Amino acid sequence: MPADDILLDAEERMEKAVEVFRHALTGIRTGRANPGLVDSLKVEVYGSPTPIKALANVGSPEPNQIVVRPFDPSTLKDIEKALHASDLGFNPQSDGRVIRITVPPLSTDVRRKMTSRIKELAEESRVAIRNVRRDANKAADGEKTGGSMTEDDVSSTKDDVQELTKKFEAQVGDLAKAKEVEVMED
């Protein structure tokens, strides 16, 4: 595998790690209502767990409210039951056609817990990025022992992989910092 392929593979995998982190951040509550808060919720309907996005239109018409409009009105009770059973701490209200969820303001203690969760997720993403770096470095060493790369090529490839690692770790750090600020503001 040439050096360019090793670098391209490492960059793609690091981008995926950052995307997973970005997606995980959407599920973390801030002071405002966000449809992403219920995106990961699975609803037991038609005999199998189904993502809420496949069953309903989820929106946030006001800063402190989420509205869930089921595509099929017969799934309303199942969605409401799943919202009650979730550990999100919401109290959904149904009017027979839509479910309204009022998002209560966060206490200082809850905000601190959210920021510590953001830090945990960021560290998991950094570890994933470092694992990609390790795999790329192993691939480069394997090419050296296979004879298709010189020692200088391996060294420069490892330097490039390290630069990619720094770049993507910085992206994770920036995303985490921005989300922490968003969570801590009133």
Image (cartoon, rainbow, N blue to C red):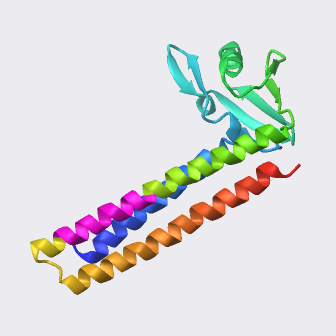
Counting from the top left corner in percent of width and height, residue 23 is at: 59, 48
Q: How many callouts does the rendering have?
A: 0
At 41% from the left and 67% from the top, the residue drawn is: 11
Residue placed most toward the observer, 5 or 30: 30
Q: Is residue 88 above or below residue 120?
A: above
Q: Is residue 158 above or below residue 10?
A: below
Q: Is residue 86 above or below residue 6?
A: above
At 57% from the left and 48% from the top, the residue drawn is: 121
The answer to whether any part of residue 33 appears in the image is no
Counting from the top left corner in percent of width and height, residue 96 is at: 80, 15
The answer to whether any part of residue 26 appears in the image is yes
| Rendering quarter of residue 172 | bottom right
At 67% from the left and 29% from the top, the residue drawn is: 56
Examine the structure image and report whether residue 38 is included in the region drawn in magenta: no
| Rendering quarter of residue 98 | top right
Residue placed most toward the observer, 59 or 130: 130
Q: Which quadrant: the N terminus?
A: bottom left
At 83% from the left and 33% from the top, the residue drawn is: 103
The magenta stretch is 129-142
Residue placed most toward the observer, 8 or 51: 8
Farthest bottom residue?
A: 152
What type of secondary structure mainly makes up the magenta span?
A: helix
Q: In this view, does 31 lie above or below 131?
A: above
Counting from the top left corner in percent of width and height, residue 160 is at: 38, 78
Examine the structure image and report whether residue 137 is included in the region drawn in magenta: yes
Counting from the top left corner in percent of width and height, residue 34 is at: 75, 42
